[in-house]
Image: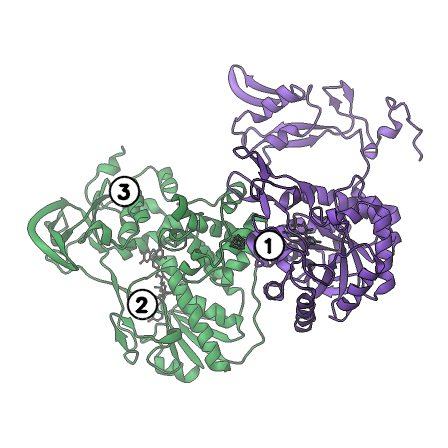
Chain colours: A green, B purple
Amino acid sequence: MSGEQVRSGIASGRLEPAQYAANFADLHPVLSSHEARVEADRCYFCHDAPCMTACPTHIDIPMFIRQIASSNPLGAAETIFSENIFGGMCARVCPTETLCEEVCVREIAEGKPVKIGQLQRFATDAAMAANKQFFARAAATGRKIAVVGAGPAGLSCGHRLAMLGHLVTVYEKKDKPGGLNEFGIAAYKAVDNFAQAEVEWLLQIGGISIEYGKALGRDVALDRLRAEYDAVFVAIGLGAARALDIPGAELDGVDSALDFISRLRQAGDLSALPVGREVVVIGGGMTAIDAAVQAKLLGARSVTLVYRRDRSRMPASVFEQDLAAAHGVHLIFNANPVAVTGAGSTEAVTFEYTSQDGERLVATGETFSVAADQVLVAIGQVMEAGPADLAVADGAFVRSEHNRSSLAGVWVGGDCARSGDDLTVSAVQDGKVAALSIHESLMG
Amino acid sequence: MADLSSTFVGIKSPNPFWLASAPPTDKAYNVTRAFRAGWGGVVWKTLGEDGPPVVNVNGPRYGAIWSGDRRLIGLNNIELITDRPLELNLREIKQVKRDWPDRAVVVSLMVPCLEEAWKAILGRVEETGADGVELNFGCPHGMSERGMGSAVGQVPEYVEMVTRWCKANTRMPVIVKLTPNISDIRNPARAAKNGGADAVSLINTINSITAVDLDSFAPEPTIDGKGSHGGYCGPAVKPIALNMVAELARDPEMEHLPISGIGGVTTWRDAAEFLALGATNVQVCTAVMTYGFRIVEEMISGLSNWMDEKGHKTLDDVIGRAVPNVTKWEYLNLNYVTKAHIDQELCIKCGRCHIACEDTSHQAIMAQKQGVRHFEVMDDECVGCNLCVNVCPVEDCITMVPMAPGSMDPRTKKPVAPGYANWTTHPNNPGAVEAAD
Ligand SMILES: Cc1cc2nc3c(=O)[nH]c(=O)nc-3n(C[C@H](O)[C@H](O)[C@H](O)COP(=O)(O)OP(=O)(O)OC[C@H]3O[C@@H](n4cnc5c(N)ncnc54)[C@H](O)[C@@H]3O)c2cc1C
Ligand SMILES: Cc1cc2nc3c(=O)[nH]c(=O)nc-3n(C[C@H](O)[C@H](O)[C@H](O)COP(=O)(O)O)c2cc1C
Ligand code: SF4
């Protein structure tokens, strides 16, 4: 063990240089063509396939698998992209174990679903490696649409609108597109700068321009967009991390897990990225798992993930939980943080055990403490103050059928319009559905 | 985008994928669903003469063989021609053709060997507006015992006679569907041509028993303790069908009579292979009976992507392209020397290549090197037979590498001769002739 690994506090360079590349390699390397053929052969080409229904974007899964089986990976990719233009990212990040693969008839029959996600990766990688474009723009309609937010929801909407012949302008607060694909998804799920490559690839359709550094509410007003464009789609995600509201939360070393991940995703050199020796992660969702696993991969000696409810209620899937456990993350359930302690910087977190009384969480009064020189908080995201004239309920923009907002001519989608079920694939579907609805409302 | 539109004996269809005459084409209900799914044409389930329809067994009609994962490999059936009234079928055919004018609707026929019988039914089919007829000379069970189906198809004189009757009694194109249950497919095919057929289609099903129930000692499918031979079809019959299609495509006497390829077509690749061997279109039965009509989407997408990738613009760029490369054994180049080569990086050391070669072939693959498990070809024993390639479970692990002319073949201890030389001029051939050119 190197000296750096045992150094206390938050430090960089805890690992041998070569170790970083190995630790942050592709979580599931793409299947070889032989593996893909064998796996594709397992698909039964079910009638009215349950996997298709379970996929939020309703990709024709049996068809694309049959296309892989008949050595037509580009045809397979076309089948995928025609419903989900982020089919490449979704193949990497979808929790398939709770979506398509959960309902695969072979999961029911033998506990071994067809590896749909990996087959999807196989086909979409082939198409992107060939820089194959499948969709051309329809004849120009002369309609202009503003999209706010260049995340998966916004770009999915923009791409579909461009396909339909509309002219799209995307307003993006940051100086890079991709949203959480670029700043949130775990590094080992989207290696080799995939998020940027995917956006570049899908923008090749043309008819979409992105204005970077333009935030709705700060640089552009919704009123202006409504006046200047034929329709507006707002997909600004949930910008702000919910803060920990307990004594000691202001100590050095307490950080938002999302910021930690975002820094990691943007780091050129992972060995320069500091991480604690004893890390505590608070939360139970995908962000918590990703922060914990990546802290461990950066060389933290111990990582403890503490979730306030019991395991069965954990939002992270069993696969994600196992992934964390396999990386040596210690999972503790039924414990609520009550204080962070330390002189100047954090040294420990005190938790109180909880028990579940129906839906209610009850404090037991019994406490324990875990040493921590870094605390990563992943207790959810909340919407940054959005445009005041869009109605909000349950922390999300109110939406009705086809993702119409409370304002005429404005559609909403993705994380900012969902309370829960915050997945890349759901954001993509929201964008697609909104685009089709916008198209219908403009073209009659 | 490649143009998949197809013309077969003057009949146009948006793609070369037709459904073969069988249960999938027995009713307007099915055919309409097929057209909606994208099929280019159908050959309606075989009609018989007017009167009480045939009756089918009421127990199982199908038997099958499967891969270990129960993928259906071969299907066998003892079904007869349509068991629905003639009038009903004709009415539906007329309606379907009217509703789907851009799709091919061909009607399969099988009536007794009497000119009057054929004349009568041809007239009624013409009234439906169907695009053509296919003469079912192939059904190997049930109908053949009544002097129809393969009982006609196995006697070239009958084939020619009935074809001639049909040509004399209709303006519709006549396609003759051939039975593979015969020793040389060229004989009935030539007979059809001589009778004036516009095209042949092949193959119909192959006589078969798929399995025997070892408890009841009865063949499967078993109907009340007994079974009967049935017609075999599906992926397992494709190699037989491909060969028969190729035989006709390269038979000078057939003078390029159009061929509709049938037998085991399951994916776009199978279809492309039939086209390359000279078929103008393909017909499909078992694959849709296994997976449903939707598979035509895969066929259309696959064929069109492959054609784009290879720069083929229309089906004519593909049809018959492999025919010149099918030749007789005696014209194969004996100077072409290959050796198997095992890629040690890919080898998983199962040893199947070794035991196949050691027990049954030429003892050319070692199983050990310096006391360690290791499989490597010994070029001085390898005759280049390809058996190891076929038994190897890893794709591309063993490949056949051609030897350059002039290099020493360690097996024969002779240099590889340059140029082309075949058996007809080989010194060991007692009938060797001087090369013609
Ligand atoms: C750490 C983490 C890991 C995750 N892992 C997974 C996973 O493995 N699998 C999965 O399916 N999902 C995962 N998710 C969820 C998934 O990333 C989101 O559901 C998805 O990105 C939502 O897409 P979106 O387009 O709605 O929002 P975002 O991706 O958040 O994009 C919103 C975009 O809008 C921009 N924006 C924000 N405010 C403004 C403004 N005022 N004006 C202009 N632009 C603005 C943002 O900069 C951003 O580009 C994860 C989320 C997190 C946080
Ligand atoms: C159940 C069944 C019934 C069939 N009935 C007919 C028929 O009535 N007329 C006919 O010409 N061929 C009939 N066939 C043969 C098919 O049309 C086709 O020639 C054969 O099945 C080979 O094609 P495939 O491998 O795609 O199934 C039948 C096949 C099956 C499986
Ligand atoms: S396929 Fe349909 S008709 Fe045939 S046995 Fe099954 S249920 Fe009965």
Q: CA distance from mark 2 to mark 1?
A: 42 Å
Q: Residues within 10 Å of mark 2 (few under 14, many from 20)?
A: many
Residue beneath disc 2: A418
- Name the chain letter of the residue that bears numbered label 3: A
What's the residue type where badge 1 is placed?
A: Val
Answer yes or no: do the residues labelled 1 and 3 have beta carbons within 8 Å?
Answer: no
Count the labels in the image. Answer: 3
Q: Is residue A74 above or below residue B97?
A: above
Q: Judging from the image, what secondary structure is the residue with disc 3 in?
A: helix
Discs 1 and 3 lie in a common subunit: no
Counting from the top left corner in percent of width and height, residue A422 is at 32, 62
Q: Is residue B12 above or below residue A306?
A: below
Residue A246 appears in view: yes
The answer as to whether callout 2 falls within 8 Å of ligand 1 is yes
Can you tell which quarter of the image residue B51 is in?
A: bottom right
Q: Residue at x 67, y 20 (%)?
A: B362
Q: Residues within 10 Å of mark 1 (few under 14, many from 20)?
A: some
Labelled disc at residue A325: 3
Q: Residue at x 47, y 56 (%)?
A: A197
- Name the chain letter of the residue that bears numbered label 1: B
The answer as to whether callout 3 falls within 8 Å of ligand 1 is no
What's the residue type where badge 3 is placed?
A: Ala
Answer yes or no: do the residues labelled 2 and 3 have beta carbons within 8 Å?
Answer: no
Counting from the top left corner in percent of width and height, residue A90 is at 42, 56
Pick whichever, B267 or B218, lies toward us.
B218
Residue beneath disc 1: B288
Judge depth for marks 1 and 3 and give the one in front. Answer: 1
Q: Judging from the image, what secondary structure is the residue with disc 1 in?
A: helix
Judge depth for marks 2 and 1 and give the one in front. Answer: 1
